[in-house]
Structures are given as structure tokens and as C-alpha cells.
Image (cartoon, helix red, strand yellow):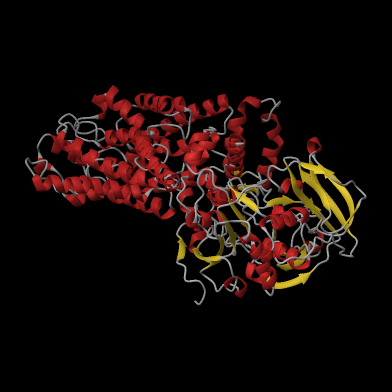
């Protein structure tokens, strides 16, 4: 590694102020700090620092996404061959899926990071690592046959209008990955909804409806067995189908302390609580669906584990996180069961609560302020 | 437990960082050749010099006073000659170095039993002798204003910071001086003098048998030993309040002044850190040079010397001096090296509050941490982390952001009067975004102080 370090040291001056490539400073810095943790030392304040940094944090999230990604790739092949009634081996299915997914990931990263680097360059900032996660989240919430140009457009929209216009990483109101999905959802609904888009190169005769698609039109008898939904052998967005794979990710996020278990748990409580309530007062077939089905259908698990927990767009106070997660859970069921237009409600529920998160925090912090002010009252009296 | 029956206060949040290099409980004596008083140790003080290079001084001779509080004098800890007035950028006065004559001659301020002296007489003696600056006030962590009557005085009798000194050892067999110091302090406030002891250990008899104080027991991780935490639980600071605070060693200095009538700057310092060959306690003087302590006593060359603990201390040179308020010197490795793909390694030897490195599988391990940032500065992304290590019910991130936008009103509402840099040290330590939180908090406190004056 010495020679690599020496090389970097040699070329570094031309990227610094006054150098030939001064304008590419942020880009150089991003690559250098990727290869080597910088030699920068503290001066005052805390002389020692925790080993964690943003790169490590984002790496952990990516690690947590890997099970969903791998299963998603496999499931694309599985669903494809199933729809055609053909039998195929594991590697054949996986290979088919990989050929679908890899281009999507590449486009997502190239477009997104391109814009991120450009903005960092223009603003003279360091490149933030957030997009390493966003860039993988976006493919995982897309249907497998999404046209690449459409994806590129969505990524650009999400990064520019979902993030950079607010001031960049840490400043955005809404989750960028969901912003990308919402953009396509409203701009190109024919490619994002319906029964035809969830299985790659589906055979025409085969019904490609997701469990929620079946539920929406009242085909409750066609909802797959719970075990299939839990394991993920169902049509859907690339990364959302396997609750089991997502749970593995959740374990990684919670064990490392990177993802908020409060948000995950409260969302599950909200969904289950409201679901059981509907079971209790059941007045039609949809309200009679067992509440726990909602946790394994559609994007609930993926949304709650990977999207709702985005620390920037979620509530930031601990008490706020409980409220925020709980309301997401309720909202998901509300949209699924009572809105006849949309089969799925996770994306909209999270985006809506993203918007309300600052308000929740405001009231939580306000309570703390009132407690502080109350202390001085006896003196006045 | 036979001491005070007061309730034990449990600090539920926090983090105790296990560093290598804790001081073994032996004391060696060093008579320092040089001592220095550093005006930069005193927040907000503008020094007006009373001496020149070459002047002869005794222990207790005035060196300078504060332009804004002329009665607050700063005196020499030892007898000898003013060797150097070391200045930095813009001629700011950094150090007044005194070369010891080895005679320990001292100015006589007259003995006195504080119980029989009036409040004014006590304050007068403390001001003249230069012991007064040892008493500090919250808010702002500045030298106490003698014209103010504080609502309470707090003494934290234990320190939970990494490698912190054991005050039981420091006050051992100094019961008389401690009691005398407390007697003086009780005259300064109409409220209580709180002596806060560690409930997780058997505190020294000097503390338990101390009269005239309210003993409060605290348990829990760092920052249970921070006076800010203790104040927040016992008698929180509201707008307009002033609370004074000191450490046990400073109480000893006050006590000895009344017992002996002169400045006895004897000061025990814990020499700590992974780079010290033989970490132990050193009996020396206030402002002592560290040269003799670390001579032939370091395991490596590329080190950071800190006056204080690694979380809150000040960087000093290898030929530097112990700070006025410090009872600890830490020597840790410098971290000025690159690490190939360091963020991606399993990290069995990397310390992290998060469990993103495998080191969490070896609890109880002691770490040799260096001064590397371990990453670049970023925007605030993570949330809910600071709350886990902040001592009481403050919203740290929200307060930091209020300071950054200089919203004085919001800072006040979020509790700026209750805090000080050291209360945020753990937040800064665990910060994923690698920001300078303690500096930000100091900026906020100074902004507030200007606003209120």
C-alpha cells in the first residue's frame, strides 16, 4: 500500500489550491479518503475520537441491504421462469436476475454520484457518503423491468429536488430514495403500477399481481400462502419481497445501533394495532385480512426497516421517533385498506410522515422547554 | 453505609471509556524547577501584568489581575524569579514562567479560622492570595464573581472521565485542610454546599466525615462525575441563577490558606495515558512543568501531551505546564498516519460506542486510542446518539444547532445556562460527523455572556 500512498502524495498538490486540477479537489478528496482514512488529528476539544465515521455507517447499511438484494436477484429469475412455466436451475435464475438488476444499480450510482460530485465540487464541500446507500435503495424499490432512462430521470430528480435544493446531505425533508420512487409513481404510473410490471419479461397469460394487487380487487383467495410471502417468493419490487431477508438486515441495523429500533418497532405496533382493530370491527373482506399479513405483504417490511429509519428525514427526537413510526404503521393500513386507487401505502405513508417529522419534533422539544420554564415558576410566585 | 442517608441518584446515560494507562496508586514527589500560570486557562480574563521578566516573587505574590474584575488577583505558586513572559500570536500572553529558587518562601496572608471570619474577610483573603480563581461559576464556567451570592456551591468528589485522578487518594490524610476549606465555602453561600460522592465505591473518610455539607450520592457512567450533571439533578440552574463549583483539590488549597496563612501550591497530579511507562501520581506544585514527569518515562516519541483528560484537556508541549484547574496529565499517541481502507476493517482494536466494529465483542478491554479523527467532517446525519451519552434531559443536537444559527432565545430555552464544554465531550467523542462540538458550545456560552452583560 506504500506505493499507492506515495502515488497519492505525489499527485495531491495538483488537486490542492493553486494546483492544476484545483477544481477537482472534492473528487480527489473523495477517492483519497475512500482509500485511506485521513491522517488528520484533533487539536482541541476531545483529543480522542470514536472509530466510527460516515463511511463506516453507510457501509453497515449497505451490508444490511445485501440479503434483500441477493434474494431479489434470485426472485426475479424465479418469477420469470415460473410465469413461463419453465423449470430452471438456481444459477440460471440468479443469472437472469443479475442481468436485470446490475444495469439498474449501475445507472443509479452513475447518475446519482455524478450529480453529487458536481454539487460538492461547486459548493467546495467534501462528498457526503449518503448516496452510497440511496443509490442502492432506489434499485431495490423499483420493478425489475423499469426502463433505464426512466430510472436515470428519477435518480436525477431525487438527488436534485429531493436533496440538493434543500442544501444537500442532512438538510433534506423527504427520503431521497422514496422521492425517486414517488416521482415515477406519479409521472409514469403505467410502468410502476398494475399487474404487468412486477415480473421481469412476464409471460402474458400469467397473472403477475402482487398480493396487495389481489387484495385491492377483492381476490382474497389468490393471496399467496403466508410462508411464501414471508420468504419472498412473490412478485414485487426488486428488494421488497422477502421479509426474511429484510429481517436479517434489520438485525444488522439494530445490532450495530445504526438503525432506529424505536421506529421499526413502533411502526409494527401501529400497523398491527390498527390491523387488529380492523379485524375486530371487520365490515368487509379487506378489513378481515389477518393483521400480521400486512407486515409480510408489499413493501411494509422494506419501507419500515430501510426507509422510515433514514435519520435525516425521520423524527430526530427519541419520543418523536415513537410517534413517527406509530403513525407510519397506521397510515400504511389506512391507505391499503380504505383507498381504492392505490394498492400500496408504504411509500406515501413514509413520505407524509417525513413531512410531519419536524412538527412532531417541535412539540417534543417544546415539552422539554416547558419543563425547564416550569422550574422557575415557584420563584415568581 | 453509615454516611448521609440521602437518596442515591442514578445517572442512566453516559459512557465510560476504558483507556490504557491508568495511574497506579503510588505518589512520587517532584520539586519542579519551573512553574507557569497560563492566563488562557481563565475564560474571559484580560490579564494586566504586575511584574516583569527578572522580578523576584514569593509564593502568593501577585503576577497580574483581571482588567474586568480588578480585585481578582493571580499569584505565583512558588518563590523564585519571573523567567519568561511567553507570548503568542497578536502578543497574547500565554505563560508566565517562574523559575523556582527552591526556598518556598511565601507571602503571609495571616492564619484564620474561617468559621470565625466574616464572608467579606474570607473573600478578601481568597482574592489577595490568588486562590479565589479556583472557585468557578455556572453558567459560563468563568471565575466566580465575588459580588454575587451563589444559590449553592457544588464539589464533585469523584471524576468519571477517562483515566481521571482518584480524589480519595488526593485528599487522603488531608482531612483538616479539606474541612477548613469547606468551612470557608459555607460562608460564601446562603444555600447548601453540596459534596457529591461516588455511590459505586466506598468514598474517603475525609468526604464522609466532612461537616457542614450536604452529601449527595451519584452512581453511573461518565458524566456522573461531572459537576454539570450533578447540578442538573440536585439544584438545576435557571436563568439568572449562579452556582459555584470546585474540585476537592481546590478545596484543599483554600483550606491550607486558612490553616497556614500562606499559599501552599502543593498539587497532586495523576500522570496517565498509554504512552507513559509508569503512570502514577506526582506530588508537585500548581502549574508545574511536565518535563520532569515524562523524562525517561514515555514508551514512544510521537505523542500528544494533554493537561487534563483526553476528552476535555488542553494540548501542551512536552516542555509544557499543567493547567491551573487540572489534576491530571495524559499522554496518548499522535494519530497522524493514514490507514488503508481503515473504515472497512473489522476493527477488533478500534473503539466505538456503536457496535459497527467487532471490538464490541471484547467488553472490558482497555484501548490505546490516538488523536486521529478517524474520518472526515460531515453534515449532521445521525440522530438519537448524543442523547445516549449526555448526562441529563437536554436535547444536545438541537442545542448545538441553536448555537450554530446564533439563536440566543432558543439557546436559552434549550438549557444553555446549565451546560459547559465538558458536558458535551462525550457527544463530540462519538460524533459520526466529526464536528468540534466543545468549541461550538464555548462559542454559544460566550455569545450568551455578551448578550447578558
Q: Is residue A23 visible?
A: yes
Where on the picture, by quarter, is residue A325?
top left
Residue B283: x percent and y percent? Answer: 76, 67
A112 versus B347 height, above or below: above
User: Depth check: B146 or B48 in front?
Assistant: B146
The residue positioned farthest toward the top in the image shown: A187
B451 versus B343 height, above or below: above
Q: Residue at x 55, y 49 (%)?
A: B424
Horizontally, is B26 left or right of B78 in the view? left
Q: Quadrant of the C terminus of chain B?
A: top right
Q: Is residue A50 visible?
A: no
Q: Residue at x 27, y 36 (%)?
A: A349
Residue B377: x percent and y percent? Answer: 57, 40
B234 versus A222 height, above or below: below
Residue B382: x percent and y percent? Answer: 46, 43
User: Depth check: B101 or B381 in front?
Assistant: B101
User: Depth check: B3 or A157 in front?
Assistant: B3
The residue positioned farthest toward the bottom in the image shown: B2
Q: How many marks?
A: 0
Horizontally, is B45 left or right of B97 in the view? left
Horizontally, is B244 left or right of B327 in the view? left
B414 versus B154 height, above or below: above
The residue positioned farthest toward the right in the image shown: B54
Residue B206: x percent and y percent? Answer: 62, 72
User: Depth check: A3 or B329 in front?
Assistant: B329
Amino acid at each position: 500500500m506504500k506505493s499507492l500512498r506515495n502515488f497519492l502524495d505525489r499527485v495531491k498538490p495538483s488537486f490542492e489550491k493553486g494546483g492544476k486540477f484545483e477544481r477537482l479537489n472534492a473528487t480527489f478528496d473523495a477517492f483519497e479518503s475512500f482509500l485511506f482514512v485521513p491522517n488528520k488529528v484533533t487539536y482541541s476539544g476531545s483529543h480522542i475520537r470514536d472509530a466510527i465515521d460516515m463511511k463506516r455507517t453507510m457501509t453497515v447499511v449497505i451490508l444490511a441491504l445485501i440479503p434483500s438484494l441477493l434474494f431479489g436477484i434470485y426472485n426475479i429469475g424465479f418469477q420469470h421462469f415460473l410465469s413461463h412455466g419453465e423449470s430452471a436451475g438456481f444459477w440460471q435464475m440468479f443469472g437472469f436476475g443479475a442481468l436485470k438488476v446490475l444495469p439498474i444499480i449501475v445507472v443509479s450510482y452513475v447518475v446519482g454520484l455524478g450529480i453529487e460530485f458536481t454539487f460538492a465540487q461547486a459548493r467546495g464541500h467534501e462528498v457526503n457518503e449518503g448516496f452510497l446507500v440511496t443509490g442502492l435503495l432506489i434499485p431495490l424499490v423499483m420493478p425489475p423491468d423499469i426502463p433505464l432512462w426512466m430510472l436515470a430521470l428519477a435518480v436525477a430528480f431525487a438527488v436534485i429536488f429531493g436533496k440538493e435544493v434543500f442544501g444537500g446531505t442532512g438538510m433534506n425533508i423527504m427520503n431521497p430514495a422514496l422521492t425517486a420512487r414517488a416521482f415515477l409513481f406519479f409521472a409514469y404510473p403505467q410502468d410502476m403500477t398494475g399487474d404487468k410490471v412486477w415480473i421481469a419479461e412476464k409471460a402474458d397469460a400469467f397473472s403477475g399481481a402482487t398480493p396487495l394487487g389481489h387484495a385491492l380487487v377483492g381476490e382474497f383467495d389468490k393471496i399467496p400462502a403466508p410462508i411464501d410471502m414471508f420468504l419472498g417468493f412473490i412478485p414485487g419490487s426488486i428488494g421488497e419481497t422477502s421479509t426474511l431477508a429484510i429481517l436479517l438486515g434489520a438485525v444488522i441495523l439494530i445490532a450495530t445501533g445504526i438503525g432506529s429500533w424505536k421506529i421499526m418497532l413502533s411502526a409494527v405496533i401501529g400497523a398491527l394495532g390498527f390491523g387488529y382493530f380492523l379485524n375486530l370491527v371487520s365490515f368487509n373482506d379487506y378489513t378481515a385480512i389477518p393483521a400480521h399479513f400486512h407486515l409480510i405483504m408489499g413493501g411494509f417490511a422494506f419501507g419500515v426497516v430501510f426507509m422510515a429509519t433514514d435519520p435525516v428525514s425521520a423524527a430526530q427526537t427519541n419520543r418523536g421517533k415513537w410517534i413517527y413510526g406509530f403513525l407510519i404503521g397506521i397510515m400504511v393500513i389506512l391507505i391499503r385498506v380504505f383507498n381504492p386507487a392505490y394498492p400500496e401505502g408504504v411509500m406515501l405513508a413514509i413520505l407524509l410522515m417525513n413531512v410531519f417529522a419536524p412538527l412532531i419534533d417541535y412539540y417534543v422539544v417544546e415539552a422539554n422547554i416547558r419543563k425547564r420554564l416550569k422550574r422557575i415558576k415557584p420563584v415568581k410566585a | 453505609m453509615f454516611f448521609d442517608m440521602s437518596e442515591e441518584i442514578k445517572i442512566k446515560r453516559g459512557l465510560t471509556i476504558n483507556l490504557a494507562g491508568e495511574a497506579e496508586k503510588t505518589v512520587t514527589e517532584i520539586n519542579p524547577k519551573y512553574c507557569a500560570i497560563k492566563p488562557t486557562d481563565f475564560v474571559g480574563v484580560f490579564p494586566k501584568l504586575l511584574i516583569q521578566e527578572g522580578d523576584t516573587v514569593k509564593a502568593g505574590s501577585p503576577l497580574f489581575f483581571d482588567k474586568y474584575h480588578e480585585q481578582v488577583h493571580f499569584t505565583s505558586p512558588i518563590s523564585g524569579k519571573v523567567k519568561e513572559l511567553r507570548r503568542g500570536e497578536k502578543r497574547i500572553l500565554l505563560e508566565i514562567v517562574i523559575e523556582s529558587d527552591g526556598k518556598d518562601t511565601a507571602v503571609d496572608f495571616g492564619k484564620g479560622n474561617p468559621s470565625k471570619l466574616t464572608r467579606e474577610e474570607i473573600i478578601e483573603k481568597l482574592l489577595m492570595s490568588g486562590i479565589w480563581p479556583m472557585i468557578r461559576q455556572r453558567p459560563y464556567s468563568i471565575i466566580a464573581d465575588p459580588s454575587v451570592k451563589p444559590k449553592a456551591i457544588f464539589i464533585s468528589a469523584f471524576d468519571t472521565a477517562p483515566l481521571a485522578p482518584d480524589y480519595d487518594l488526593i485528599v487522603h490524610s488531608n482531612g483538616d485542610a479539606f474541612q477548613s476549606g469547606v468551612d470557608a465555602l459555607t460562608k460564601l453561600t446562603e444555600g447548601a454546599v453540596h459534596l457529591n460522592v461516588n455511590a459505586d465505591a466506598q468514598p474517603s473518610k475525609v468526604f464522609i466525615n466532612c461537616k457542614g455539607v450536604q452529601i449527595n450520592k451519584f452512581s453511573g457512567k461518565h458524566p456522573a462525575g461531572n459537576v454539570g450533571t450533578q447540578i442538573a439533578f440536585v439544584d438545576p440552574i435557571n436563568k439568572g441563577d449562579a452556582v459555584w463549583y470546585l474540585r476537592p483539590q481546590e478545596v484543599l488549597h483554600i483550606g491550607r490558606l486558612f490553616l497556614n496563612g500562606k499559599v501552599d501550591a502543593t498539587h497532586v497530579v495523576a500522570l496517565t495515558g498509554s504512552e507513559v511507562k509508569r503512570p502514577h501520581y506526582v506530588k508537585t506544585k500548581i502549574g508545574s512543568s511536565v518535563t520532569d514527569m515524562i523524562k525517561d518515562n514515555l514508551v514512544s516519541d510521537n505523542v500528544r501531551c494533554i493537561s487534563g483528560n483526553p476528552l476535555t484537556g488542553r494540548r501542551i508541549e512536552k516542555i509544557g505546564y499543567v493547567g491551573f484547574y487540572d489534576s491530571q496529565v495524559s499522554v496518548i499517541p499522535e494519530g497522524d498516519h493514514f490507514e488503508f481502507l481503515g473504515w472497512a476493517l473489522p476493527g477488533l482494536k478500534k473503539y466505538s460506542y456503536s457496535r459497527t466494529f467487532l471490538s464490541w465483542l471484547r467488553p472490558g478491554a482497555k484501548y490505546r486510542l490516538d488523536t486521529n479523527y478517524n474520518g472526515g467532517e460531515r453534515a449532521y446525519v445521525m440522530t438519537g446518539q448524543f442523547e445516549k451519552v449526555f448526562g441529563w434531559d437536554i436535547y444536545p443536537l438541537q442545542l448545538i444547532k441553536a448555537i450554530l444559527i446564533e439563536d440566543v432565545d432558543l439557546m436559552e430555552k434549550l438549557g444553555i445556562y446549565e451546560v459547559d464544554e465538558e458536558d458535551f465531550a462525550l457527544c463530540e467523542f462519538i460524533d459520526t460527523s466529526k464536528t468540534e462540538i466543545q468549541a461550538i458550545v464555548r462559542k454559544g456560552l460566550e455569545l450568551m455572556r455578551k448578550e447578558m452583560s
